[in-house]
Image (cartoon, rainbow, N blue to C red):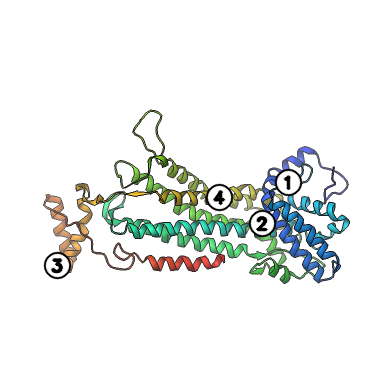
């Protein structure tokens, strides 16, 4: 059995080790490529300050490149007696190269090592989420333009209110996603800071060149204060979770709308039979299970920021093992968010929008405000026009004119699609 890198000459009780490691080894597999990337930058910096010999650096880089290739082929695993990804990679390097492999940890702690791994991992994951949001955004904008002339009822208090349109409905969720992306961009900027060199949270007596590793790893800047760098563990994850929660809120609302619009009492939209599910007893049923599951998942995702907040709320300064549990919460949440976004895009690619919905007599009163505004434009004072139309509704003489003439910015007749697209394009620049 290999001796652990941090061994003090004794092994912990097996139950203690199993309890404290938990799912960490499984989740750490996703960090392997980033651990190699961080180590490569670190040893280049060590060589630049004389802590590695000129002939040692290329040997170590080649050894790490071989391990990176193992990871990319999907052949990397953490052996049963090895605690984490950092230990596994260093042991693999030492097996290949001998004692020279042990030099890569100079000037580092596992604290800043896992921090840089997590930062690099979350940076890529945020880009992945951003790409999925951007794709759904494009789908919503295309649907908004395609169906911009199709009227639908607008509701307040779930009562028929005023005319809306499918252009407005699809476009509303597109623009809502641009706000969510602002939060995702903020999380990305918080993530994209280099903690490497903070060691266990109090720096190092080695003359580490932290600006060099910042540039090599493509970070915007370092976390300058080494204590602040360690404090970013938890803060970064909470920022990411808040952004995911915002996207989930928007997507969950949209899923609820679709469930409602599919109901026979509305029948505004439908989907091909193969995208719906049936009932074990009612042969007519075509259930919106995809959107119900999406709604449920998005509601759960909105709890993730609170779960992380509770996990980290009363921790003392410095590293605490509780922080390890954040991976159990955040890693699956990011995957679930991306899955929901991709499924929403897939489903909306097949949505069928009903025509002439507002011709139904049940929607006559949608057009009362249009009638009030028509009278006002002809010179009737607003209060008098409102009273007149109200009396017609009450005595049953109101007859709707099913026409909508909205031209102001952001209305049914002026969707501002290009302007909203520009908003999204601007925020997407954050992600490169």
The residue at 42%/42% (across/down) is: 275
Tell me the element at label 2: helix
Mark 2–mark 1 contact, CB under 8 Å?
Answer: no
Counting residues from the N terminus, which is met first, the one under dot 2 or under dot 4?
2
For residue 286, side relative to residue 399 (left or right)? right
Q: Alpha carbon of mark 2 to alpha carbon of mark 4: how far? A: 17 Å
Please provide percent x and percent y for residue 38. Answer: 72, 61
Q: Alpha carbon of mark 2 to alpha carbon of mark 3: how far? A: 65 Å
Choose mark 2 or mark 4, whichever is in front: 2
Choose mark 1 or mark 3, whichever is in front: 1
Please provide percent x and percent y for residue 64. Answer: 77, 58
Tell me the element at label 4: helix
Check residue 380 in the rendering and tell me which mark sits there, or answer none.
3
Counting residues from the N terminus, which is met first, the one under dot 3 or under dot 4?
4
Q: Alpha carbon of mark 3 to alpha carbon of mark 4: how far? A: 54 Å
Where does the N terminus fall, quadrant-wise?
A: top right
Q: Residues within 10 Å of mark 1 (few under 14, many from 20)?
A: some
The residue at 86%/67% (across/down) is: 53
Counting residues from the N terminus, which is met first, the one under dot 4 or under dot 1?
1
Choose mark 2 or mark 3, whichever is in front: 2
Instruction: Quickly name the residue at label 2.
Output: 118
For residue 233, side relative to residue 181 (left or right)? right
Examine the rendering and report whether any part of residue 224 can be seen: no
The residue at 74%/65% (across/down) is: 41
Check residue 304 in the rendering and tell me which mark sits there, or answer none.
4
Q: Alpha carbon of mark 1 to alpha carbon of mark 3: how far? A: 78 Å
Instruction: Quickly name the residue at label 1.
Output: 77
Q: Of 218 and 193, which appears nearest the observer?
A: 218
The residue at 44%/43% (across/down) is: 290
Please provide percent x and percent y for residue 74. Answer: 68, 48
């Amino acid at each position: 059995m290999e001796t652990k890198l941090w061994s003090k000459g004794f092994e912990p009780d097996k139950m203690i080790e199993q309890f404290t490691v938990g799912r960490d080894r499984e989740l750490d597999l996703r960090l392997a490529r980033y651990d190699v990337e961080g180590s490569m930058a670190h040893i280049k910096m060590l060589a630049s300050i004389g802590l590695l010999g000129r002939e040692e650096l290329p040997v170590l880089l080649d050894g790490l490149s071989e391990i990176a290739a193992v990871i990319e082929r999907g052949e990397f695993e953490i052996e049963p007696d090895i605690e984490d990804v950092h230990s596994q990679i260093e042991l693999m390097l030492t097996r290949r190269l001998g004692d020279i492999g042990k030099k890569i940890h100079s000037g580092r702690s596992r604290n800043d090592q896992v921090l840089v791994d997590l930062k690099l991992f979350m940076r890529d994951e945020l880009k992945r989420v951003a790409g999925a949001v951007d794709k759904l955004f494009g789908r919503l904008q295309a649907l908004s333009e395609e169906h911009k002339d199709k009227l639908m009822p607008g509701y307040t208090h779930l009562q028929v209110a005023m005319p809306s349109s499918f252009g407005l409905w699809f476009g509303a969720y597109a623009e809502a996603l641009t706000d969510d992306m602002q939060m995702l961009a903020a999380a990305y900027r918080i993530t994209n800071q280099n903690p490497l060199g903070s060691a266990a949270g109090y720096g190092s007596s080695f003359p580490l060149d932290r600006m060099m590793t910042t540039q090599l790893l493509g970070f915007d800047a370092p976390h300058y204060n080494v204590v602040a760098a360690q404090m970013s563990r938890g803060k970064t994850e909470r920022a990411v979770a808040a952004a995911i929660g915002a996207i989930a809120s928007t997507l969950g609302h949209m899923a609820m709308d679709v469930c409602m619009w599919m109901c026979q009492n509305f029948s505004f939209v439908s989907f091909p039979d193969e995208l719906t599910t049936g009932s074990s007893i009612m042969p007519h049923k075509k259930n919106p299970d995809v959107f119900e599951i999406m709604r449920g998942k998005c509601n759960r995702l909105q709890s993730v920021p609170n779960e992380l907040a509770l996990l980290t709320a009363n921790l003392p300064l410095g590293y605490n093992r509780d922080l390890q549990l954040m991976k159990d919460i955040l890693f699956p949440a990011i995957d679930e968010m991306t899955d929901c976004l991709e499924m929403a895009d897939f489903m909306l690619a097949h949505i069928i929008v009903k025509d002439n919905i507002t011709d139904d007599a049940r929607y006559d009163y949608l057009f009362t405000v249009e009638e009030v505004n028509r009278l006002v434009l002809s010179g009737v004072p607003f209060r008098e026009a409102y009273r007149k139309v109200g009396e017609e509704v009450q005595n049953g003489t109101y007859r709707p004119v099913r026409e909508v003439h909205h031209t102001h910015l952001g209305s049914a007749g002026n969707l501002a699609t290009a302007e909203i697209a520009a908003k999204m394009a601007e925020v997407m620049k954050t992600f490169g």
